[in-house]
Image (cartoon, rainbow, N blue to C red):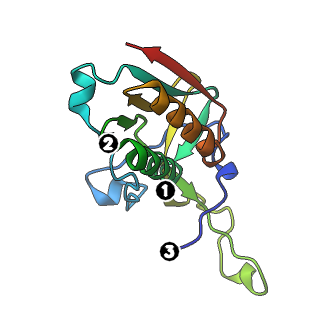
Amino acid sequence: MASLRKASAYSKRNVTPFTRISKKRHKSYIKTVPPQKIVKFSMGNEALLKSGKLPYQLTIVSDEKVQIRHNALEACRQFINKKLEKSLVATYVFKVIPFPHHIQRENKMLTGAGADRMQTGMQLSFGKAVGKSAILKPGSKVFFIAVPNEKALILARKTIKQIKSKIPMKIRIIYEKK
């Protein structure tokens, strides 16, 4: 697989959501849509949440307008789920809330000797699809965690602090006790 462009090339840009995929292939600007990297959106024991046995709830909220790539969401999901599963077994609920719809594009450029004869530059520079991202507004929910007790709540907070470097935005944690 080709290497990814750094996230700052996309994350804090003003962007118009691009999700158009035509059923007729010849009418579609984007011929192939990149596959979804996020494997699961909901983990843990949903029945415990519905029965009210998980009173401590954390919601991670975005504080700025940002694009977050699907591979960043998946990296956070794996990290948080692994930590919660290891210490809380099946007494938690963890959800990834945003769904990446926006298709990111890249106009690949060549560098080096002879590159000027091989590429078109900015002519027809729509770009090829390289990934997907979710466009978040300030106040958008990113993750939801529900745990049974205060000890687990402390663990969940510590885990959230560890993922801050994986996401390209300032976040806020909202606590609730149901």
Q: Nearer the viewer, residue 128 or 62?
A: 62
- Marks 2 and 1: which is nearer the front? 2
Residue underneath mark 3:
1
Residues at marks 1 and 3 touching, judged by CB atoms closer than 8 Å: no
**Mark 1 belongs to which amino acid?**
Gly
- Marks 2 and 3: which is nearer the front? 2
Residues at marks 2 and 1 touching, judged by CB atoms closer than 8 Å: no
Residue at point 41%, 56% (across, down)? 37
Relative to 117, residue 93 above or below: above
Residue underneath mark 2:
43
Label 1: few (<14), some (14–19) or many (≥20) C-alpha neighbours in 10 Å: many
Mark carried by residue 131: 1
Mark carried by residue 175: none
Residue 72 percent location from the top left of the image: 53, 50
Q: Earlier in the sequence, mark 2 or mark 1?
A: 2
Q: Secondary structure at mark 1?
A: strand
Q: Earlier in the sequence, mark 1 or mark 3?
A: 3
Residue 135 percent location from the top left of the image: 52, 36
Residue furthest bottom in the image:
114
Separation of marks 2 and 3 at Cα, in angstroms: 28 Å
Residue furthest front in the image:
151
44 vs 136, left or right, is left
**Mark 2 belongs to which amino acid?**
Met
